[in-house]
Amino acid sequence: MDAIPETFPRLLLEHGRVRPHKCAYREKYLGIWQAWTWAQVNDEVRALACGLAALGFTRGMNLAIIGDNRPRLYWAMLAAQCLGGVPVPLYQDAPAADMAYVLENAEIRYAIVEDQEQVDKLLELQADYPGIEHIVYDDERGMRHYRQGELVSYARLQETGRAWDRDNPGFYEAALAAGGGADNAIILYTSGTTGKPKGVCQTHAALIAAGTGGTGFEHLTDVENVLSYLPMAWVGDCLFSFAQALVAGFTVNCPESAETVTIDLREIGPSYYFAPPRIFEGMLTQVMIRMEDAGAIKRRMFDHFMAVARRVGADILDGRPVPAVDRLRYALGDLLVYGPLKNVLGLSRVRVAYTAGAAIGPDLFRFYRSIGINLKQFYGSTETCAYICLQPNGQIKFDSVGMAAPGVDVKLAENGEVLVKSPTLMSGYYKRPEATVEAIDPQGWFHTGDAGIFDAEGHLKIIDRAADVGRLNGGAIFAPNYIENKLKFFPFIKEAVAFGNGHDTVCAFLNIDMEAVGNWAERRNIAYAGYTDLASHPDVYALMADCVEKVNADLAADAAMSDTQVHRFLVLHKELDPDDDELTRTRKVRRKFIAEKYRVLIDALYAGRTSQYIETQVKFEDGRTGIVAADLRIADSHVVPPHVRRAA
């Protein structure tokens, strides 16, 4: 394309003209990959848009979209935009009660959902929110006996749309022509870590600027393949699977289900891949578990070539000079270890891989880059279309999120908060003008709420949320997220919550990773009955203590953080869970909520007790509630004393 169209429907139209027979979307259904070309997608979107118009959907209305990543749901986003409407994707795993606020706030009258499960949620909500007038469902399984008048199948709506299109010639073209870059293209709701979620309004111009900047930075073309498996309501998926896909024209692949993502990843072999740190951590954990169960010869070969990779792999990936002998050793390692390993992970064809959303451990980062996977971190937020900082090839630093992306200005406020000016900035929070004014100052700088520092080369390091940075009673800066991330770098620790603001010392809650610790326990013949039983086992506490002490040694080497070593910790009797309001849907810690809910445990940590009994209400997947009770052990951890820190 010479000039990039200013709206997504016009981008879709252009792809249908320029590359009509190029594969645009794939979806695995009943074990078979189905494919649609750009010409076919144009026909599908047109039929759906006209069907919505026949139902009365008009410019300025909002359309709720709920379900797993499905081509037809992406087309629903485009269909709404074709009519001048705004798609509002919701997290598909959210319970009905959590959806109610967004539906009401966004004034939803029309919804397109994936299946019976999502239909049932919306029907359940009608008593509290009767505003939904039309519910369109894609998957017809289980829907045979539903007789509600507001229900219509996706296929039936498209049939209606094709007839309506014939009866109203020129309507569709006029609707597309009426749209402009300043129109809102989507409303994405924030995770609500500090209160009710806010609807972030992003325009076509902002999202297309982010898509153009990212594809240009990484030289992405229409030959790329991306696996779309993260929630459609999350800004990262909106950037990679929607904005960038429609700017570059590459193929979006939707897995059959969450359970088949690993298999589908291997089958597709994407060239462009994104995953949050927890996914990369899970992959590496699986690799290490398999190697521990492997034979002695295979383990020795793996250890030998991984040592070679750690020594020279990243330098080879970055094009730096490496001795010929080491290049030969690395090539042999690629043949025997790295290549087969990447194939098992489904990453053989990856040209660039991204991670974001949380800090990633240096060892984890180094592992993937050492075996030849071009893994990078980026930094962004919902309010900036996930586009603030990127890492240029050859300038990868494990402890930074890169440099300001093309077209973006970044600076630090006096208190260290990261401020951003960018063409990708939101038009505002939906129906929240006061919040918009609070987030964007009169000079046009967006206040991210993150605290950061620049290194000597201009790379940005994020240390915590600015609002969460506090101080110990002794005056030391306390950045809880910085400590928590160091703890979570260990594969045995799934979640961590640190406390210390207004206290003399730092204490922490830990969640074990059930799969990693379970495998560790089984290899040591440790019997356990479930999560609570395993988490309280003395050997598991010793394992956690070892992880905490290694973090303390790391913190001790940092002059600014040495006073924030973890003095005491406990292992929670249950996993922190979004359904229990302890985490957001993007698995960010709701720090204040946890502090209130587990106040008795925090008091016990700081009172010097060795144990504390607690009963906690939990929600099950079927909606029932129950009680998990335990007498939690509280452990002291080794702290590196001041004179040792100075000597180091």
Image (cartoon, rainbow, N blue to C red):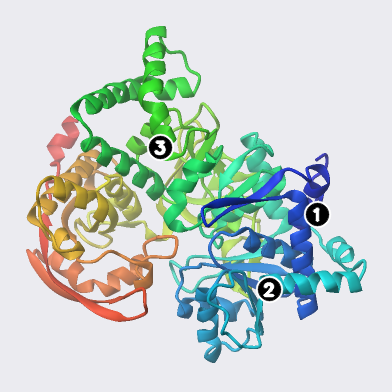
Query: Viewer-nearest of labels 3 and 2?
Result: 3
Which residue type carries mark 2?
Answer: Asn
Q: Marks 3/2: CA distance?
A: 42 Å
Could you say where residue 143 lies in the image, as x and y percent from the top left?
Answer: 56, 78
Residue 210 visible to an observer of this rendering: no
Three-letter amino acid code of the residue under disc 3: Val
Left or right: 409 with respect to 379? right
Q: Circles 1 and 3: CB distance less than 8 Å?
A: no
Check residue 597 in the rendering and tell me which mark sits there, or answer none.
none
For marks 1 and 3 on the same chain, the one whose residue lies earlier in the sequence: 1
Dot 1: element: helix
Answer whether residue 47 is visible to the viewer in this image: yes
- For this rendering, which residue is in front, 100 or 70? 70
The vertical placement of 333 against 234, above or below, is above
Q: Nearer the viewer, residue 591 or 217?
A: 217
Query: Tag 1 or tag 2, which sits nearer the N-term?
Result: 1
- Which of 218 and 405 lies nearest the eye of the viewer? 218
Q: In the rendered image, which residue does mark 3 sit on?
A: 344
Q: Nearer the viewer, mark 1 or mark 3?
A: 3
Q: Which residue is mark 2?
A: 62
CB-based contact (under 8 Å), mark 3 and mark 2: no
Residue denoted by label 1: 10
